[in-house]
Image: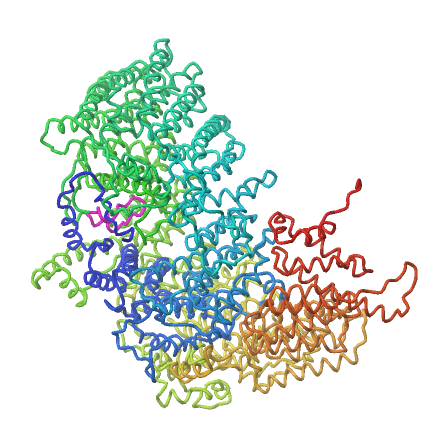
């Protein structure tokens, strides 16, 4: 059974009546959708569809919308409750919702809330994907493929994310009419090549690859074995995944010049998109790649996943070593952890009874074991990493693997752990080993899972004992964690006899010390001799008694010494919680001890507890004693309780504790003994079984009476009150008793006691009848004892408190003794009231469903109840007295009532007469809080219990897939269920008059002058309000009044009021209730009279928190027919009854809406008054503006005063006012336009937008090939091209054409005004803004203030999108007349070319004008262009370095998502009237022309390329231009223009899918495109010119030559491809560029050329190529290396790039290509130049890491053969007979030594089988002449360095003879030898 399906209430010990039936009735009546776990599939489907109807509407506020989405997502997530055959989900509604939230219009309401809603919808769409029908895939492709345009990054990541969300990836049910073939096929295999084709575009963003891999991974996983990727597809995914791992070999080292790195401008920045321009969709690259590997693992065929993963492991293994720590380490560790977890999850899923994966597609065990062996290699390397996170992830990896195949993990791991724990000098290894033991303890001690592990438990426990060391708290925590987990897993510390001698013999082939690489038993697990295993386990238990003794002594020493360090206030964070961990572990150990050890344990603990009496050790020792008393209660009480009582009486008799003291921090040393023994008594009674306390009834009563009547020390009577609380709670509460790992009946079973090791790790299902939770249920004797305590101690204190308060009311100052006496009364009563919760339930009555609405809406996750208990009535909780009519019930209820009256009376007295008595006020506030809130449990206790359960879930890796868990954890969960029920009853209490009085008094103290009192009061009020929501509403005006302006403002009261109003309950009440919300907003916005910084900070934080959730009232919508029918199906109600209920609720909702609308209007007017008030400061004006931004809605006409105020504020002297006015006014103008279009469908602007059918004649006319040159033809005067509909979407048609496209008709003829009719209700607002903007001198002020300089630093003075958007709205609404009004100012600012601020303001105005003229008539446009073109021509001719960026942003803003034919005059001016002139003597002007040309290409790409090409720009003539800026821009523009000529333009998405499928499993290779004939000719011409200049080049240090300048331009051209999104042109011309780049690396007379060439070479090597391209690039590099003309310098620089290329493209290069690369590198080992041989050694070492075992064996043979012939002996000082032949022999032998050295160096952390022999062979060359000798020495030195840490394991791979030979090589010579 799933854990979340367990009904924990069945474990409770009392009768729960008809609770479940009540639950179902409440569930159906109130639609509590979150409690779906108990409903049937049919009901689930109905509820899901109902919730879907709510979630896909825009008429819900943010809270309800989020709740609906979250609830629906939870329901859809339950695959066992809802399947795709139960229901289908309409993807279109969700898609429209996402699209509307993703690209909101400027007129849409609640812009701040859009992101929150978007996140909710994204989460919902992820869960809904499996319910999309299979036919939806083609519909989604029809929608999204036409939006793809990969020449630009604009919007493209979002499109890929939408593909992830909406293309259905789940396997379709068989009965859904799936079409597997033909043109209407919905088979995944039909469109999967399309995904790989899009993937092959290979953008430069890492998230691009990640989202495609996520999509393919989801597809493979959710198809449940029905889809198997081909080997080619898997290689493609592996190649991409390798680049996602962030390894330093294939990424990151190259840096771009600044001119190139700014090539791309993301125009999505000009829109209201989510942060970072993408959806909030999680993508974890490591997880995605790991899941893909695991779920494509099927067989061991060559080229399959297992084979490729083995190659991947060999490549990345060195990066896992601790010495190779870097930025890649984190993702590699996460990748490994995810591999193990996903493998475990897949294995469990396929082993389940209801597994849907076919048998043929399930993972075979021998494949799994081989895969685990490979993952294990990496995990063992990661075990001792430097980072804590990586070490933790290695432990998680090993644990997950051990859950599957423990023998493969524990056999090599245990030997490593034993050695590491024994280590004295390497502390980090010891700590990591202990952490690993703690993580793997439950798996290791599971006898049924891994029988051999049981025999290691006792030795490991003994070995880890030194880890409990106060000097190392971290190590102690891990050692204790190991012990604790062992106990939780059921290990019993009881000795077992091992009869006779050990049976059988230990298997010699496999020992715990087997090497990691030894996989002789990988395929099948070894057979065990169970008799031998059991005998060894029994024998190991003999160590338990000694271990218990040593463990307790260690813990005692730890606690004793730790208390001293904690007392110094210098304790670390690890030390603070160490004593709690030690106490918990000790409790678990004592629970698991056998009874024979009880005397020893009792003796040790008693001696320890009574041997020291240090105040600093009180808390630590108390925890240990409590653990002892919880585990062995009878012995603990018998040995310690009488002793404590005796010492307490003796101390008090001697006068200790009788001196009055209110201090809780410092204690008198004379009280040390008294406090010590009282604390022990508190520990003995805490969570104790009340039956054991009955024996000590008289002693407990006497000592409590003595302490609470005579002692006046705060610390003493405070602890005595805790004793009172613990005793009462132990006697009266219903709680679990036993913390052992098995039930009491099983513990007493002789068979279990004799063979308990067989039960280690065996946990019963919590639903099994044998689970047997033993509960403490109060007996009559316990109840009588508790009542006696209450009568003797608690009840008299109430009367004493009343009398004392009455006496103090007479006046006069209280003495210190009286203050202490009052404090003691309050403290005792506080603890007594808390303890009464177990006696009677809280007062309550059945609550009507309407009263639960607020709770449901709030969805308070922090304080919410489990759904199963969220009923409208109280539930049984096992209270002692439940009959309200009984005398006992009345007695306890009377005591609580009297305590409440006394608390209220005391609160009133303290507020009136003792406001400065801080300590007693804090105590009475706590008393009041507990009187109201604590009925067995309060909110804080409930939250603590739930956090503890969540922590247990995390620590023990519990999930919802299984209800099997350690018994201790299950018992704690049952206790949490009991606590939850008690808290549920508390939340259903009525708000009585007494509770209201207490709350009012507590609220007064929230405004206290003392911060301590305010903190206590605010916390108490927050707790009360969360329990009794109704009491908060009368308090809100009280706190709001404190924010108002008064003659004598009190900042302390304002601080308290703001802290209360910022609490969650108060904030939600103010936000949702329109009775209070306007008051709250106005109070905050008018609270500017207080200057205290703390108050201002609180006001701002409160306002900002509220603004995020503020929304205007939403109208009541009619009930949808679909919702009505679903409700009928759910409730089986008749039509009349349902209609009557709907009408009744609708009337209420309408009334509430009308009230909220009226209040909203009044609030807006009041906020406008604040804005118009000249005395309003900028801070509060900004807050008012934030609220107005959210409250103004398109459904209501804009307020004229607001519009007028915002228009006036455009010319405010304060920058913040101007910025806020620009944003808000733009939104209001957008709302006016929207309302006008909605109310007047016949307006001229409404007919401009059309839906163009691409199969119609008009659609076919503009489709490719005609569409690419449409702008060119329009510029040439073609009337048909100019009159064609405008298509603003730049992506439309680039990849595929949609069936219909949103287009706009050409501009209307003269005399037509777009917004000729303004909606009547908005007319006044329209006139208000018109009157301001058309006033004389207004635009002069706007121009002056918007161009102000000096208010921002120069780097922050950027083009303002919000200001440009305002101008766009203005010009759009007021048309040409406004331009005539503003033109003088615009022209003046534009002509001030020396002033940056003027240029920025002019650029913003003109940018807004260009976008705002979208719907202007032809005559208006002609007038605009007549003014604008000459002006821009002048401006662009005088651009300076400081102003260029403004006009670039202006054009980007204007051109973004606009058809280029809208701006034909401007395009004509930029392209034709002022062409680029490379001979000009004004280089900056020419560079500016190229910059603007780049803007055109960046904005319009393929739609403008032919136009620019037709103008024949003289870009090539700038190849050797003398000015760098011109050259760089010319190279960039040439590349962007060449790339822009590429487009796919399939006629339809379906045609694209079918065509791409014909290219094979990975579709079409879009990365390979050499460009058009013009581009190819351009590249040839550039290379030819550079080659010609090279022949004429004479190196010189006096300036640059044509060769240098031309080379820089050519290299910049190529670099632009790596900065621009499309690199296909650059990589396709590598054959032309690579030879030149390799030579230019050595251009010593020009450092810039050399740097650019090196960058190019590095980038070419790092690129992930497709299969065809990778082969071509490798061939080109090899040809470059083998070219006889290549200089040795070039070879040394090119060889490392060959390694990078091979590593980056390991999975795309063929085996033959890799062999050629290795052979070529090996040839250079015989090069005459020693530098080349050294470079070849490094290169070959790297290549070997990426080579197969066959290649390595061939290399071993090849290089070993070179050492077979020895060198002839040459005497010292003589020459050889034939020097040339001897030199050739030395060279040949050196090549052999270098080759074998590279084999050694390629495996720095492992010892392959062949390596020992290679080392021996190399050692024979140590006496050869140099450079052979030095190479051998360096090789052995590096081998010694890399294997030093693991030599104790590595040496086992060598024979004794080999070790003897190597000893002389590895051990340094000693001077004294």
* Percent of width and height locating residue 136: 32, 74
Q: Residue furthest right?
A: 1774
Is residue 1455 in view from this perspective?
Answer: no
Rendered image quadrant of residue 1711: bottom right
- Residue situated in front as seen by the camera: 169 or 1383: 169
* Percent of width and height locating residue 220: 40, 68
Whether 1215 is among the magenta residues is no
Is residue 1600 in view from this perspective?
Answer: yes
- Residue situated in front as seen by the camera: 841 or 1363: 841
Q: Magenta segment, which residues?
A: 852-870
**Is the residue 1537 above or below the residue 779 in the image?**
below
* Percent of width and height locating residue 951: 37, 44
Rendered image quadrant of residue 540: top left
Whether 857 is among the magenta residues is yes
- Residue situated in front as seen by the camera: 229 or 976: 229
**Is the residue 182 above or below the residue 992 in the image?**
below
């Amino acid at each position: 059974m799933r854990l979340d399906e367990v009904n924990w209430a069945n474990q409770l010990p009392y009768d729960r009546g008809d609770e479940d039936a009540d639950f179902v009735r409440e569930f159906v009546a109130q639609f509590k959708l979150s409690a779906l776990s108990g409903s049937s599939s049919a009901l689930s489907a109905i509820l899901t569809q109902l919730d879907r109807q709510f979630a896909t509407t825009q008429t819900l506020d943010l809270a309800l919308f989020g709740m609906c989405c979250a609830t629906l997502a939870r329901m859809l997530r339950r695959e066992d409750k809802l399947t795709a055959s139960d229901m289908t989900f309409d993807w279109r509604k969700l898609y429209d919702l996402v699209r509307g939230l993703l690209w909101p219009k400027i007129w849409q309401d609640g812009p701040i809330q859009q992101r929150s809603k978007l996140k909710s919808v994204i989460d919902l769409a992820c869960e809904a994907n499996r319910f999309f029908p299979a036919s939806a895939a083609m519909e989604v492709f029809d929608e999204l493929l036409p939006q793809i345009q990969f020449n630009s990054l604009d919007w493209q990541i979002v499109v890929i994310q939408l593909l992830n969300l909406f293309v259905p990836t789940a396997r379709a049910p068989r009965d859904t009419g799936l079409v597997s073939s033909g043109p209407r096929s919905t088979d995944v295999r039909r469109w999967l090549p399309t995904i790989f084709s899009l993937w092959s575009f290979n953008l430069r963003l890492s998230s691009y690859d990640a989202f495609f891999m996520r999509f393919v991974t989801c597809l493979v996983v959710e198809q449940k074995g029905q889809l198997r990727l081909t080997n080619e597809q898997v290689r493609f995914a592996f190649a991409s995944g390798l680049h996602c791992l962030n390894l330093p070999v294939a990424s990151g080292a190259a840096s771009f010049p600044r001119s190139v790195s700014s090539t791309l401008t993301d125009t999505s920045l000009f829109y209201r998109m989510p942060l970072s321009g993408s959806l909030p969709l999680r993508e974890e690259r490591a997880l995605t790649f790991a899941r893909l590997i695991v779920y494509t693992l099927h067989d061991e065929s060559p080229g399959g996943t297992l084979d490729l993963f083995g190659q991947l492991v060999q490549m990345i293994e060195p990066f896992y070593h601790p010495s190779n720590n870097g930025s890649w380490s984190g993702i590699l560790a996460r990748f490994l952890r995810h591999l193990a977890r996903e493998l475990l999850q897949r294995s469990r899923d396929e082993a389940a009874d209801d597994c849907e994966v076919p048998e043929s597609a399930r993972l075979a065990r021998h494949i799994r074991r081989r895969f685990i062996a490979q993952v294990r290699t990496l995990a063992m390397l990661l075990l001792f990493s430097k980072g804590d996170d990586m070490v933790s992830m290695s432990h998680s990896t090993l644990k997950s693997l051990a859950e599957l195949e423990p023998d493969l993990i524990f056999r090599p791991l245990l030997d490593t752990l034993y050695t590491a724990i024994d280590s004295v000098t390497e502390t980090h290894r010891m700590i990591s080993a202990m952490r690993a033991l703690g993580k793997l303890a439950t798996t290791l001690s599971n006898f049924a899972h891994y029988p051999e592990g049981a025999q290691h438990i006792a030795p490991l426990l003994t070995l880890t004992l030194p880890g409990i060391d106060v000097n190392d708290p971290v190590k102690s925590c891990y050692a204790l964690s190991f012990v604790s987990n062992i106990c939780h897993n059921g290990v019993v510390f009881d000795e077992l006899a091992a009869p006779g001698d050990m049976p059988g013999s230990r298997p010699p082939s496999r020992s715990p010390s087997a090497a990691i690489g030894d996989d002789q038993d990988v395929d099948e697990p070894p057979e065990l001799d169970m008799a031998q295993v059991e005998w060894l386990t029994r024998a190991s238990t003999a160590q338990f008694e000694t271990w218990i003794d040593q463990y307790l002594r260690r813990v005692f020493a730890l606690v004793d010494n730790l208390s001293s360090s904690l007392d110094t206030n210098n304790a670390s964070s690890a030390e603070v919680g160490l004593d709690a961990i030690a106490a918990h572990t000790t409790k678990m150990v004592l629970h698991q001890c056998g009874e024979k050890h009880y005397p020893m344990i009792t003796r040790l603990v008693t001696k320890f507890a009574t041997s020291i009496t240090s105040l600093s050790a009180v808390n630590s020792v108390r925890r240990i004693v409590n653990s002892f008393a919880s585990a062995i209660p009878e012995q603990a009480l018998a040995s310690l309780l009488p002793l404590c009582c005796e010492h307490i009486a003796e101390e008090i008799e001697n006068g200790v504790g009788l001196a009055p003291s209110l201090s809780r921090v410092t204690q008198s040393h004379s009280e040390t003994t008294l406090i010590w023994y009282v604390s022990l008594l508190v520990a003995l009674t805490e969570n104790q079984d009340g039956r054991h306390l009955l024996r000590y009834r008289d002693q407990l009563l006497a000592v409590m009476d003595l302490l609470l009547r005579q002692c006046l020390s705060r610390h003493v009577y405070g602890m005595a009150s805790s004793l009172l609380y613990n005793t009462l709670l132990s006697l009266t509460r219903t709680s679990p008793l036993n913390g052992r790992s098995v039930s009491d009946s099983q513990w007493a079973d002789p068979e279990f006691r004799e063979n308990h090791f067989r039960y280690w790790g065996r946990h019963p299902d919590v639903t099994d009848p044998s689970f047997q939770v033993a509960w403490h249920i109060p007996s009559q004797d316990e109840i009588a004892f508790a009542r006696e305590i209450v009568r003797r101690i608690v009840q008299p204190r109430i009367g004493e408190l009343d009398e004392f308060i009455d006496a103090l009311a007479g006046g006069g100052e209280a003495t210190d003794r009286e203050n202490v006496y009052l404090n003691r009364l309050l403290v005792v009563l506080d603890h007594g009231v808390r303890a009464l919760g177990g006696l009677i339930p809280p007062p309550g009555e059945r609550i009507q469903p309407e009263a639960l609405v607020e709770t449901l809406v709030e969805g308070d996750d922090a304080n919410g109840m489990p759904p199963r208990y969220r009923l409208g009535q109280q539930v049984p909780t096992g209270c002692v007295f439940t009959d309200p009519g009984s005398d006992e019930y009345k007695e306890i209820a009377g005591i609580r009532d009297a305590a409440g009256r006394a608390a209220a009376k005391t609160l009133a007295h303290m507020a009136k007469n003792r406001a400065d008595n801080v300590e007693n006020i804090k105590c009475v506030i706590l008393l009041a809080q507990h009187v109201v809130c604590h009925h067995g449990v309060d909110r804080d206790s409930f939250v603590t219990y739930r956090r503890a359960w969540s922590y247990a879930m995390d620590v023990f890796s519990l999930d919802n897939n299984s209800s099997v868990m350690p018994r201790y954890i299950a018992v704690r969960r049952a206790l949490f269920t009991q606590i939850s029920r008690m808290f549920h009853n508390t939340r259903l209490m009525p708000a009585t008059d007494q509770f209201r009085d207490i709350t009012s008094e507590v609220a007064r103290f929230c405004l206290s002058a003392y911060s301590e009192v305010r903190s206590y009061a605010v916390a108490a009020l927050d707790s009360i309000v969360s329990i009794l929501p109704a009491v908060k509403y009368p308090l809100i005006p009280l706190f709001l009044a404190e924010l108002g302006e008064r003659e004598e403002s009190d900042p302390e009261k304002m601080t308290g009021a703001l802290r209360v109003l910022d609490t969650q309950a108060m904030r939600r009440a103010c936000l949702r209730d329109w009775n209070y919300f306007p008051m709250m907003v106005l109070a905050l916005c008018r609270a500017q009279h207080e200057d205290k910084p703390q108050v201002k900070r609180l006001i701002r934080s409160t306002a900002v928190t509220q603004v995020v959730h503020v929304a205007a009232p939403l109208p009541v919508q009619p009930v949808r027919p679909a919702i009505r029918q679903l409700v009928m199906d759910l409730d089986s109600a008749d039509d009349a009854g349902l209609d009557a209920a709907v009408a009744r609720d609708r009337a209420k909702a309408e009334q509430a809406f009308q009230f909220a609308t009226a209040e909203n209007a009044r609030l807006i007017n009041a906020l406008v008054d604040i804005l118009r008030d000249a005395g309003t400061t900028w801070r509060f004006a900004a807050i008012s503006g934030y609220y107005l931004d959210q409250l103004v809605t398109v459904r209501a006409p804009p307020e004229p005063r607001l519009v007028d105020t915002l228009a006036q504020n455009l010319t405010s002297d304060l920058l913040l006012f101007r910025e806020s006015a620009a944003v808000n006014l733009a939104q209001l103008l957008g709302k006016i336009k929207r309302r006008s279009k909605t109310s007047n469908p016949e307006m001229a602007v409404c007919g401009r937008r059309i839906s163009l059918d691409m199969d119609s004649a008009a659609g076919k006319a503009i489709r490719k090939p005609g569409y690419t040159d449409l702008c060119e033809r329009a510029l040439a005067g073609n009337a048909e091209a100019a009159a064609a509909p405008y298509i603003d979407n730049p992506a439309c048609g680039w990849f595929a054409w949609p069936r219909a496209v949103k287009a706009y008709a050409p501009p209307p003829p003269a005399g037509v005004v777009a917004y000729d009719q303004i909606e009547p209700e908005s007319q006044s607002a329209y006139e208000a803004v018109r009157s301001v903007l058309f006033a004389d001198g207004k635009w002069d002020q706007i121009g002056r203030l918007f161009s102000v300089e000096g208010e921002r630093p120069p780097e922050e003075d950027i083009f303002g999108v919000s200001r440009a958007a305002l101008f766009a709205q203005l010009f759009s609404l007021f048309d040409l007349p406004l331009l005539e009004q503003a033109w003088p100012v615009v022209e003046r600012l534009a002509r001030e070319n020396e002033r940056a601020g003027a240029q920025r303001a002019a650029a913003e105005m003109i940018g807004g004008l260009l976008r705002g003229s979208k719907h202007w008539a032809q005559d208006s446009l002609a007038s605009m262009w007549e003014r604008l073109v000459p002006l821009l021509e002048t401006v662009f001719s005088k651009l300076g370095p400081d102003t260029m960026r403004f006009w670039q942003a202006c054009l980007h803003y204007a051109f973004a998502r606009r058809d280029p034919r809208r701006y034909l005059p401007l395009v004509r001016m930029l392209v034709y009237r002022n062409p680029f002139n490379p001979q000009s003597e004004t280089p900056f002007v020419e560079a500016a022309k190229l910059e603007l040309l780049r803007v055109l290409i960046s904005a319009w790409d393929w739609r403008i390329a032919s136009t620019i090409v037709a103008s024949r720009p003289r870009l090539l003539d700038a190849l050797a231009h003398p000015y760098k800026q011109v050259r760089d821009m010319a190279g960039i523009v040439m590349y962007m223009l060449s790339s822009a000529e590429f487009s796919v333009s399939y006629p339809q998405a379906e045609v694209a899918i079918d065509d791409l499928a014909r290219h094979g499993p990975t579709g079409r290779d879009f990365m390979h495109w050499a460009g058009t004939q013009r581009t190819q000719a351009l590249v040839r011409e550039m290379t030819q010119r550079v080659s010609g200049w090279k022949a004429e080049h004479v190196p010189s240090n006096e300036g640059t030559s044509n060769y240098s300048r031309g080379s820089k331009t050519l290299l910049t051209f190529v670099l632009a491809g790596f900065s621009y999104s499309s690199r296909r042109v650059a990589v396709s011309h590598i054959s032309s560029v690579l030879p030149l780049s390799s030579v230019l690396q050595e251009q010593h007379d020009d450092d810039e050329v050399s740097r650019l060439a090196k960058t190019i070479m590095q980038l070419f090597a790092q690129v992930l190529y497709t299969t065809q391209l990778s082969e071509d690039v490798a061939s080109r590099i090899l040809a470059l290396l083998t070219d006889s003309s290549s200089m040795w310098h070039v070879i040394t620089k090119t060889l490392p790039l060959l390694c990078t290329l091979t590593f980056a493209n390991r999975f795309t290069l063929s085996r033959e290509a890799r062999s050629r690369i290795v052979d070529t590198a090996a040839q250079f080992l015989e090069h005459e130049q020693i530098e080349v041989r050294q470079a070849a050694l490094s290169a070959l070492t790297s290549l070997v890491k990426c080579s197969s075992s066959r290649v390595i064996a061939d290399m071993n043979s090849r290089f070993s053969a070179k050492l077979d012939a020895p060198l002839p002996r040459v005497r010292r000082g003589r020459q050889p007979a034939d020097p040339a032949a001897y030199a050739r022999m030395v060279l040949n032998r050196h090549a052999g030594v270098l080759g074998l050295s590279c084999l050694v160096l390629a495996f720095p952390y492992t010892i392959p089988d062949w390596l020992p022999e290679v080392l021996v062979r190399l050692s024979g060359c140590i006496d050869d002449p140099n450079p052979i000798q030095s190479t051998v020495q360096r090789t052995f030195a590096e081998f010694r360095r890399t294997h030093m840490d693991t030599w104790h394991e590595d040496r086992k791979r060598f024979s004794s003879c080999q070790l003897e030979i190597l000893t002389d090589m590895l051990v340094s010579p000693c001077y004294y030898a």
